[in-house]
Image (spheres, grey):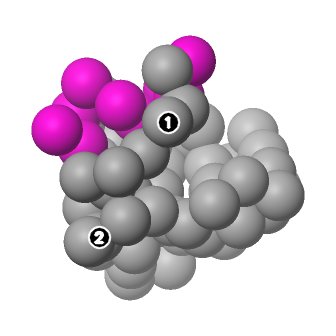
C-alpha cells in the first residue's frame, strides 16, 4: 500500500494519520487493532503473524 492508501485505511480504523510517516502510521493502526506494533522493527524478523496485512511490505 502506498501512503495515501494507508492513511485512508487508518481513518477507517479510527486512527488520525496526521503527519506520521508510513511505518509510524502502520504501527498506530496495529496498536489500535490490539496487535503487536512490530512493523519495520527488530521484532519483524521473528514475526509469526502469517495473516498480517502488512507482512509483504514489512519483509
Does the magenta segment cover residue 56? yes
**Residue 19 image point, x, y percent:** 38, 81
Pick the residue in front: 41 or 46: 46
Q: Magenta residues?
A: 51-59
- Regarding mark 2 in the picture, which secondary structure is present there? loop
In the rendered image of this protein, does residue 47 appear above or below residue 37? above
**Residue 24 image point, x, y percent:** 40, 73
57 sits left or right of 46 in the view: left
Which disc, if any, is residue 48?
A: 1
47 sits left or right of 29 in the view: left
Label 1 Cα neighbours within 10 Å, binned few <14 / some 14-19 / many ≥20: few
Pick the residue in front: 19 or 36: 36
In the rendered image of this protein, does residue 48 appear above or below residue 40? above
Q: For the residues marked 1 and 2, what is the alpha-carbon distance in whole angstroms?
A: 14 Å
Does the magenta segment cover residue 29? no
Label 2 Cα neighbours within 10 Å, binned few <14 / some 14-19 / many ≥20: few
Q: Quadrant of residue 57?
A: top left
**Residue 42 image point, x, y percent:** 26, 71
Image point 25% across, 52% down: which residue? 45
Amino acid at each position: 500500500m502506498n501512503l495515501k492508501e494507508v492513511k485512508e485505511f487508518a481513518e477507517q480504523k479510527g486512527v488520525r494519520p496526521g503527519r506520521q510517516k508510513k511505518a509510524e502510521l502502520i504501527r498506530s493502526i496495529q496498536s489500535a487493532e490490539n496487535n503487536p506494533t512490530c512493523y519495520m522493527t527488530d521484532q519483524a524478523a521473528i514475526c509469526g503473524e502469517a495473516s498480517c496485512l502488512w507482512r509483504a511490505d514489512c519483509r
